[in-house]
Image (spheres, rainbow, N blue to C red):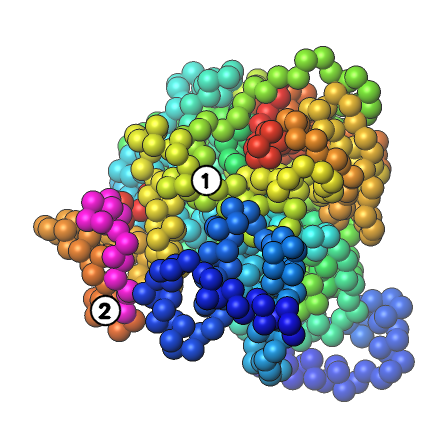
Amino acid sequence: MTGSNKQRGRISRAPENFLSQEQIAAVSSGRRDFLRQAMIAAAAVTAGAALPLRAGETGGDPEILDLPPWSKTLGKPVASNPYGSPSKYEKNLIRRESPGLTRVGAASVSFAPLQGLFGIITPSGLHFERHHQGWQDVDPARHRFMINGLVRTPKVYTMDDLMRLPSVSRIHFIECGANSGMEWGNVAVPTVQYTHGMLSCSEFTGVPLSALLEDCGADLKAGKHILAEGADGSSMTRTIAMERALDDVIVAYGQNGEMLRPENGYPLRLVVPGVQGVSWVKWLRRIEVGDQPYGTKDETLHYVDLLPDGTQRQYTSIQECKSVITTPSGGQTLIGQGYYTITGLAWSGRGRIKRVDVSTDGGRNWRTARLETPVLSKALTRFNLDWQWDGSPALLQSRAIDETGYVQPTMPQLRGVRGTKSIYHNNAIQTWAVAASGEVSNVQLG
Amino acid sequence: MSSWDRATGIKLGLSALALATIAASPLTGATSLGRPATEAEIAAWDIDVRPDFVGLPAGSGSVDQGMEVWESKCESCHGTFGESNEVFTPLAGGTTRADQDSGRVKSLVGPNVPQRTTLMKLSTVSTLFDYIRRAMPWNAPKSLSDDEVYAVTAYVLYLNDVVSDDFVLDQDSIREVQNRLPNRNGMTRDHGLWDVAGKADTHNTACMKNCTGEVKITSSLPEYARDSHGNLADQNRSFGPVRGTTTAASAAPAATTAPTQPAGPSRLGMAEENGCTGCHAMDDTIVGPGFRQVAQRYAGKAGSLDQVAAKIRAGGSGAWGSMPMPAQEQLNEEQARELAEWILSGAN
């Protein structure tokens, strides 16, 4: 109590006129927290340094000595926020568009704020978005799912039907084929949100597509491919090899324990583990079984990778092994010298992550990072490594190796095969430069 | 609703034992759910057209008819000649007669590839037909008749000199068009990114010590682009091991050395810093109208710049509903005009 009194006594010693008219009004209207904020700000300016304050002068940290309002007041009742939302202090971490990348919001991308996320699960509200013709909030009671083509019985399922069937729940990453696509030629964007943020990872719940194909009596001999089609305006279509379709593809309605978000295909989307996001058709209305690929716009005209010889690769699908350091990363500034945990994400469309190495000298020397559990096939894997920052410039890189033994390539290695006009499937090692000031920025190495 | 009746019927017939059977061996025989699709239902949804023209509906449309549809429904986004505008990618252009003969677009080779038009990339004409049929016009997809789809497809092909101005595209003539597409031979599916067991492009090794010689930074963001994505301090937490780097123009003294940077990002940054984007999105209404809705309303009107600039500083309500906009007195007249100019030019 004495300390607390002492602390209150400081108010009278505050510099004159440090409150604005606005703040005085706030104080006189009874908003004491406002006064406190202003006082701390003034104290910080006076001291010329951030809190905590020096013990000798004040008796300790006012955050300890002067109990905060949340310790001395009644909190809010249950269900006052019936669908919970993040703290007001978390407002900086939101999906963002990259200015200038696209010109129309309904045919655009919003990037997930990877720089501030933990573990491997992307909160559903922060899952990246890519829409070709806007997003829809489809009425689940009116949604139908059809399977036709080379099947014994073409069938229609309602959501009632699908949600009564035995389900599976699996954690998988989804990455847009164009993730890191702005960086093929040179550094173009400042932070990991924009370089790698077309990447998310969720637990998806639904019915294995194999079970539904079996239910319709799909002709697995003649039926070499399936076509997936959406119910939205774009009616997005992609061809998927039957072998893939029978393996681990899910007709999903659940995401992270609740229904899919509308922006992610509510009430039904395809989950195609390891394959680029465009094949995970949202608002899924139809699967057709056929003996030929379908040659749709987003597999033969867009989402094609241009090679230096002028050939364009069609039907690209697999997202190869890739990793990125999320902290410290571009656009961040270290708060001082000393200990840090370098942490980031690794993933592979071909299976599990086996190992991640981290370099702090631009790829000259490497140390093997710890993999945080779980380490799942075709899911994000979180890695971390201890690092003492001595205040000198550093070049941070991570290099992932998957269970096939494939080692994530350097940017020059990738360019050597694909040139700089590929747009899609840039899985090169990312470099972040740490300046002596602690400022971290996006760079590429020769 | 009949589907629900059926489902209920099946549900009532299910015993605990049958459910257990489902769990063990999903969806076998009588325990399966769903119902047969009718012919009419399949016809209504099965609209895809394959490269071998399976699924192609009967019909026809001429280049002339296509032009009529084009001018009323396509031109506003894609331009009179398919050159499009800055919002969408050009459809036509970039190919030669020789490309049509060889089936390979020469300008795609080498390091200096120009912007790729649709017809530079298109390898199967079915793709063009299928996409227009399912997704165009952009704001009214699936509203064209099959004949209109044929006509518009013909017109796009005409814009790229693949067909002549008197051409009529139908379910038969589309097959000969396939053999004239400039990039019909320019595509491959022979690569490692189709199959999960496909061959990788690169073969890096996991060297651990003294792996490289001198390390050189070959690319970084230019100083003038520091705030191209807004103030990065506002895109990170204000606690934890790092802070977002302050890149706002007002906080970065270096920014004054680059006064002539492109208008887009910095004006957007200005709108963000002043809290405008809390209520105004680019296109859609949040609390207030989207910037482009404002641009649209004032388009071509005399004195609109002064009017909008004044409105920004004074605030008010009424023009877009009753929700009042607070006065933005922190902006001086020049800054308000700058913002107004950006908004009225489409907030690009």
Tell us which disc is closer to us: 1 or 2. Answer: 1
Viewer-side residue, A311 vs B204? B204
Viewer-side residue, B242 vs B143? B242
* Picture quarter with the C terminus of chain B: top left
**Label 1: how many Cα within 10 Å (few below 14, some 14–19, many 20+):** many
Residue most extreme to the left: B302
Residue type, label 1: Thr
Q: Going from the N terminus, do you reach mark 1 or mark 2 first?
A: 1
Coordinates of residue B47 in the picture (x, y in percent): 52, 54
Coordinates of residue B209 in the picture (x, y in percent): 82, 20
Badge 1 and badge 2 both on one subunit = yes
Name the residue carrying label 1. B247
Residue at mark 1: chain:
B
Viewer-side residue, A61 vs B189? A61
* Picture quarter with the N terminus of chain B: bottom right
Residue in the image at 49% along x and 29% along y: B221
> Which mark, residue B222?
none
Mark yes or no: residue B181 visible. no
Residue in the image at 79% along x and 32% along y: A357
Q: Is residue A361 left or right of residue B109?
A: right
Residue in the image at 61% along x and 70% along y: A4
Q: Is residue B30 left or right of residue A147?
A: right
Mark yes or no: residue B343 visible. yes
Magenta residues (range)? B324-340
Q: Is residue A365 left or right of residue B244?
A: right
Coordinates of residue A203 in the picture (x, y in percent): 72, 59
Residue A77 higher or lower than A22, as above or below:
below
Q: Is disc 1 placed on a helix, strand or loop?
A: loop
Asked where in the image residue A194 lies, by quadrant, the reply is: top right
Coordinates of residue B203 in the picture (x, y in percent): 76, 23
Name the residue carrying label 2. B317
